Image (tube, coloured by chain):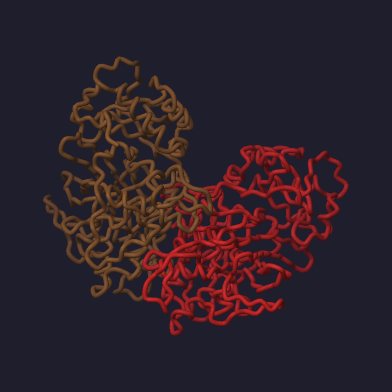
Chain colours: A brown, B red
Amino acid sequence: MLDATHDAARRSRVASANGHADFPIQNLPLGVFAPPGGAKRAGVAIGDSILELASAPLTGVAAEAVASMADGTLNGFFALGAAPRKALRAQLSELLSEGSTAELVLHDSGKCTLHLPARIGDYTDFYAGIQHATNVGALFRPDQPLMPNYKHVPIGYHGRASSIVPSGTALRRPNGQRKPAAETQPSFGPSRNLDYELELGIWIGPGNSLGEPIPIAQAAGHIAGYCLLNDWSARDIQGWEYQPLGPFLAKNFGSTISPWVVTPEALAPFRVAQPARPEGDPKPMAYLWDETDQAEGALALELEVWLTVPGAAPHRLSTSDARGLYWTPAQMVAHHSCGGCNLQPGDLFGSGTISTEAGYGSLLEITQGGRKPLTLPSGATRRFLEDGDSITLRARARRDGFAGIGFGDCTGTILAAP
Amino acid sequence: MLDATHDAARRSRVASANGHADFPIQNLPLGVFAPPGGAKRAGVAIGDSILELASAPLTGVAAEAVASMADGTLNGFFALGAAPRKALRAQLSELLSEGSTAELVLHDSGKCTLHLPARIGDYTDFYAGIQHATNVGALFRPDQPLMPNYKHVPIGYHGRASSIVPSGTALRRPNGQRKPAAETQPSFGPSRNLDYELELGIWIGPGNSLGEPIPIAQAAGHIAGYCLLNDWSARDIQGWEYQPLGPFLAKNFGSTISPWVVTPEALAPFRVAQPARPEGDPKPMAYLWDETDQAEGALALELEVWLTVPGAAPHRLSTSDARGLYWTPAQMVAHHSCGGCNLQPGDLFGSGTISTEAGYGSLLEITQGGRKPLTLPSGATRRFLEDGDSITLRARARRDGFAGIGFGDCTGTILAAP
């Protein structure tokens, strides 16, 4: 599946793209932006610039793909599936290459506002980070950290779509009910245990009709792209509210995503085999099992979490790896639709928090539920997040012989509760 | 709040409306329909007819309200809030009264297709039926049926919006993973324990901005109307998947709603005080407590569930009452937004299954988890639903001195699994 668009030697006419950590010409992620004083429109990140897609002299299905974005969202584009996306990538790679003299409208990305790339119809959060599930489970059930269903079922739940915001949007600390173990009665007020969660986001398209499951062998064809997702979590609200129906207000005050949609084609060089299951783990059931998916359905992505507290330099809290997921994105698609649930273009999945043995994707794990506060280089300490703190998620894909690519920042700052 | 539109003596020029169990002139519910061969458009149910709203000679904000429906949804109308809705009701009541000679386009409702009245942005299912929660809890935990949080927190969770369908849509039985207690390994296949749930649906509008909670005193103003909701549930899938994050595939294969939006104004004569909490129950926290809401925030609605099995007449499975809800719709709005989550016009809430001591809102309760099969008058027996079975939910509001109104049928039929 690799082609000239992946050639590490290809250089861009946009000088800042050459050697760019996130957006070299080998990436070409799609998004929706507004230039200063302008309306929302579709674009492609290239180095420190954004190419306005409507300005590009495209032909055939690539031109039709851009026409589908005329409403200022990528929903129609996600609905088209892989072929127009690949044609668009091929033509954009040529137009943005060194030597191309096509007339293009490029904007300074630092002066533009990035928006959500699509209307999110439904948002589903999975729980596929097995190390995270084990770490969190161990805090509550040391003898049996994982539920009996975990290695059979790609556990997930429905989240809140309306409160998903693009990187750079500040969020207020939520008020809510909480009842610490030491208190006899619940009380209402600002969350005291506010946390982040490091997740991969998965954009869906074209999707399926109600009652028509997506077979696992076709599931990868319904993934339109990837982003980073910070599933902010109020642990004290969660602990009190979540039984018996799961997290609700603990999560729905806001989730932050990186605004650029990194395509499956851009990530093709970084596909790897799904890590082998430990000896004794059950083989996935037939509706979740596909040899191709097992051979190349995982992504080699290095992940980072940075914390910036007021008055101090950013501090890298942890590193992780997308290979910490027990289920592939295609398995999530097949599972979600196996009972007939209809997935739609612009639906978003979260992977679940991704931790490794060495790097934790949440403060809940780093500080062991707040019991072991973290001391930062500035001397500040944190059990959980305080007002004014910012969290930035980053992802990088690297492989010898290929140009590395990234996702761009996924940043959010916590403001005081209302 | 009662006015001439509630006058029991008012009769309609549409003869079938006079004495109509659901849609007399005192109701005037709004919806979206398509006449044979025609496009979707907004209408009002009046007896056995549907008034095409765009045909009505309306003035002022009532005319603007109908203009907001030009896209074939009520989302824009829900966003306008109560004042235009009341003005529209007043003018429609006059236009449809006996003696009115205004030119109107009326359709035979039996020949029209009813659609979802709005694009559902996010769907949230509450768990406010305390008798249901107690009955279900008792099946699993006889000593402590209700969780410690139940009487403090209006428990709810996010559901799936894409698979909500209007009455009359057949649904396929879902396949999924299930592991009965008697089996050592989970398996995949058609649900064996398919159930319905009797719920009230609550349409939201205008809603709030992210980070700006809706105070309880203003919460009722964000309710645009009501419908019936059948939260179909695959109990065997639910039992295996739901820990620790709640129901997922057990619920998202489809939910059925009645297509007419019964307005708060139509229900004004049937508002009653929230039933007093049993001695010893905690008083709701301040953000959930409002004297007016306590005095008139509940609805006196008689509810019915009818089961039709192939080859037999419909059988009334149970009767229930909306006063079986432990939390008012306004308390649900205030709770949902208290942490800053933004509600939007066209969001839908489910109340949770409504049971009373005498009438159960699910087969799970009627057959005690399938242990005590039900024998129907035809001699057929049911533990749970079989292929070809239909469930119809109905609601009626009655009060001496007022014309009774209803919601119309909420019907769904179960087809075989794919």
Residue B177 seen = yes
Q: Is residue B143 left or right of residue A196?
A: right
**Residue A365 x, y percent position in the rendering:** 22, 61
The N terminus of chain B, quarter of image:
bottom right
Q: Is residue A308 visible?
A: no
Q: Nearer the viewer, residue A125 or A151?
A: A151
In the image, A253: left or right of A281?
Answer: right
| Residue drawn 35% across the image and 41% down it | A225
**What percent of the width, then of the height, locates residue A94?**
30, 23
In the image, taking residue A317 as reference, residue A84 lies left or right, namely right
Q: Where does residue A144 sit, x and y in percent of width and height?
A: 27, 73
Quarter of the image for residue B230 reads bottom right
Nearest to the observer: residue A196 or residue A416: A196
State the residue at coordinates (79%, 54%).
B47
The residue furthest right is B99
Task: Give the mark count.
Answer: 0
Question: Compared with residue A242, is residue B167 higher up or lower down, i.e. above or below?
Answer: above
Q: Estimate the x, y position of residue A372 in percent, counting from the top left.
A: 17, 64
Q: Residue furthest front?
A: A291
Pick the front one: B209 or A407? A407
A175 is higher (above) or lower (below) than A414: below
The residue under the point 45% across, 36% down is: A80
Quarter of the view holding residue B382 = bottom right
Tell which residue pokes out farthest to the bottom in this image. Answer: B143
In-front residue for pair B172/B298: B172
